Image: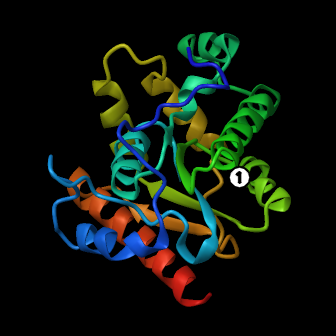
Amino acid sequence: MMSIDTTCTVTGQKPPSAADLPSIQAAATGTPLMTAASPAKGAGRAGGHTHIWLVTGPAGCGKTSVAEHLANALNMPYIEGDSFHTPANVDKMRSGIPLTDADRWDWLTALREESMRQINEGRTGVVLTCSALKRKYRDVIRVAAYYDHHLLIHFIYLDASEELLLQRVTKRQGHYMGANMVHSQLDILERPSPNETDVITIDVSRSLGEVQQDALERVVDMMGSDHDNQ
């Protein structure tokens, strides 16, 4: 179990700059992300901003796979949200007991604080996985921007049918999130509303490669727009 002072960081990374945006745009359109001789660089501080990219959605939607892809492409640290759950929360989920709002508050706060800690240490952005099933959970993370007006927060919501989620979770080996928990997550799920303008919705019914490519292209487009508006 990871403490709140630890994060899963993609190795070999240095903070990127806005000047690196063209290389990421090339990656998003099919150019290999990195080679042994020249690692890809990100565009974290587009237009002078820092970014938190939250990959969200229910269990089985592919948060980790998409987030790791983005973290590598953008040259940003990756924070695995599941690793910040308390042992008590993990025990409940392993036993098939849904988490309550009270169970989640400290977890969400820890994720927000870890993201801000990474940025305060000089990171130009972070990529974070967090189910963020309800709007009020997403709002807990949004509070971070109140403390730093240079910080932009984005949610990448991975949209999947219940059937697809159940298929994926059933195939997992050794994970505490069982198929029965998918139902409980969907019961409380509040899909992002149209007025949540900081949310990108990605259809994950396609192949993993297509989903990763779509997510990266959407992220790069947003960063490019931010840079152009400065």
In the shown orientation, is residue 34 left or right of residue 227? left
Amino acid type at mark 1: Arg
> Which residue appears at 49% of the width and 76% of the height?
222
Looking at the figure, which quarter contains the C terminus?
bottom right
Residue 120: image x %, image y %?
Answer: 70, 47
Q: How is the image coloured?
A: rainbow
Find residue 174 and report its image quarter.
top left
Q: Position of residue 214 (x, y in %)?
A: 32, 67
Q: Is residue 91 above or below residue 109?
A: above
Task: Judge whether 93 appears above or below 132 on screen.
Answer: above
Residue lying farthest to the bottom in this orientation: 229
Give the side of residue 168 with respect to residue 63, left or right: left
Q: Quadrant of residue 70?
A: bottom left
Residue 195: x and y in percent read 70, 75
Q: Position of residue 141 (x, y in %)?
A: 73, 50
Q: Is residue 174 left or right of residue 134?
A: left
Q: Is residue 122 visible?
A: yes
Task: Identify residue for label 1.
Answer: 138
In front: 128, or 39? Answer: 39
Q: Nearer the viewer, residue 58 or 216?
A: 216
Picture quadrant of residue 199: bottom right
Element type at mark 1:
helix
The answer, for residue 54, to whether it is visible in the render is: no
Number of other residues with Cα within 10 Å of mark 1, as a class: few under 14, some 14 to 19, many 20 or more: many
Quadrant containing the N terminus is: top right
